[in-house]
Image: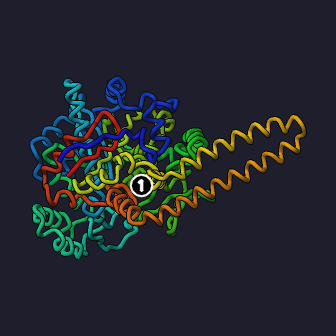
Amino acid sequence: MKKLLNIPFTEIESIPLLIKDFLEKRIIGFENNVFNEENIEKQFQLKRNSFSQEERKILTKVLVQQYSGFQLSVKQQENLKFLENENTFTVTTGHQLNLFTGPVFFVYKILQTIKFSAYLNQKFPEKNVVPIFWMASEDHDFAEINHFKTENHYYETKAKSGGVVGKILVEDDFFISEFENEFKDSVFGTELILLMRKAYKKGNSLSEATRILVQELFADYGLIVIDGDDVYLKSEMKKVFKNELLHHELFETTKETVDFLTEKYGKVQVNPREINLFYLTETRNRIEFKNDKFHVIDTVISFSKDEILKELENHPEKFSPNALMRPVYQETVLPNLAYIGGNAEIMYWLELKNYFESINLPFPILIPRNSMLFISEKTLDKTKNLSLKLTDFFRNFASVTKEVLMENNEILPLLEAKEKTLKTHFDEISAKAELTDKTFGNLVNAEKTRQLKSFERMKKRLLRAERIKQKEKLERLENLFLKIHPGKNWQERVFNFAVFYSELGREWLQYCYEEMDVERSELIILSI
């Protein structure tokens, strides 16, 4: 295994412009939320001043309860002890409770969070920084998380959905026997099968399964897992939730930013609602205010103002934040410095800056997580044989294909040269023609357009002819693209970690950790 190339996100066509502008500090007002040591130092002070000792006591009490029955690593025990101290802070990532982690970037974002915490501990030895994984146990879209893919198979589990996914119990374990058939002969296949059986034992909830899985993989790194579906943590949100119900504060304070982002970047990742809360029963349903009542959508439940405030006071655990309110919840209950997330996550966090200011909550450093791509030596050789660079696979591949097919074509450069000459001649004639008569100038320009369209048709026809002529080469190109982008998507968004772990085990985890770059957001390409 070796590193082949690092491509900064700012140089990759498909990375959203908003992320590029954020990383380049081009968005006014967010300069202090981009990672650098100076901004981290400011964040230490902001968070120390805003996070009370009482909040620390609640946090450590909850974590100790949530880890009841687990054997903690030495590093985890140290980190839990550190969290009692006012000089201890956190770096957090979060994710849905995907079946057996889902796509492999689940692993990458956790490893980056662990390594970034270690980096800060080294840079600021007088502080302690603890890596946190926030389980999105309150999500209710089971269809998003009930499956994963390997190179050869698709795995899925069945369950009754509609409520929070963290409470769904494992009842269907057919996917385990299928998984065993695929990986039983792999070097570390038995280890993976035993891990899957332990985590997804019948009767375990998906929250329990995910905690077991993450614990087995990352306990030795000191990672702490937190489940936000907790009455003590929710109690700290009573004031925020009350303002949300009565004053629609998030919706109102984000309007300006949402308008700005929509105007400049086309759309926002998540549109704020007037009330950004769900109500939990056996299902998780949105709360909406109309006709002087708070209605729980798609149920018969409704509350008057006094009733819903009483319900919040007595049962805060029944109120659940949506995607935009969850960052607020997380930053309220953790002494957090930075959040590491995917591009889509960072994009919706950016909507919230003014809301954080309105409730006097420090807005964290935001770090778009690194991406990783593993390429076999065989695939690497094929790229070289076609005279392709690895960066070509992260450009518009239609343009790359055209360049390869037309590489030694003699007609195309001739056509382009003559087209350029034709355009120059028509521009000269047009300039003189308009001095004679405007309508004559229009006639010349119309003829110029007609002839340039002919050139465009000839170039398209030429490309089509080359595609037919070089059919075999085109197929090799397309197959190579699909090898690097399975399903026409980034590898990390398709394959499960088992694809890599099955042959390399914990050595692969450690290798990913070592190659992860915590100072830049980039794509790291490695051979395997």
Q: Amino acid at mark 1?
A: Phe
Q: Quadrant of residue 502?
A: bottom left
Q: In x, y percent, where is residue 146?
A: 32, 67
Which residue lies most toward the right here? 437
Is 78 on the left-hand or right-hand side of 359? left
User: From where the camera sits, is residue 357 visible?
Assistant: yes
x then y, percent, for residue 523? 33, 44
Query: Does 318 appear above or below 26?
Result: below
Camera-nearest residue between 512 and 121? 512
Coloring scheme used: rainbow
Q: Residue at x 40, y 68 (%)?
A: 162
Disc 1 secondary structure class: strand
Q: Give the residue number, with chain letter if any, for mark 1.
A: 319
Residue depicted at 58% across the width and 41% down the height: 264
518 to the left or right of 281 = left
Q: Residues within 10 Å of mark 1 (few under 14, many from 20)?
A: many
The spot of residue 355 in percent (x, y) is 50, 38
x and y percentages locating residue 252 in the rendered image: 58, 42
Q: Nearer the viewer, residue 309 or 385?
A: 385
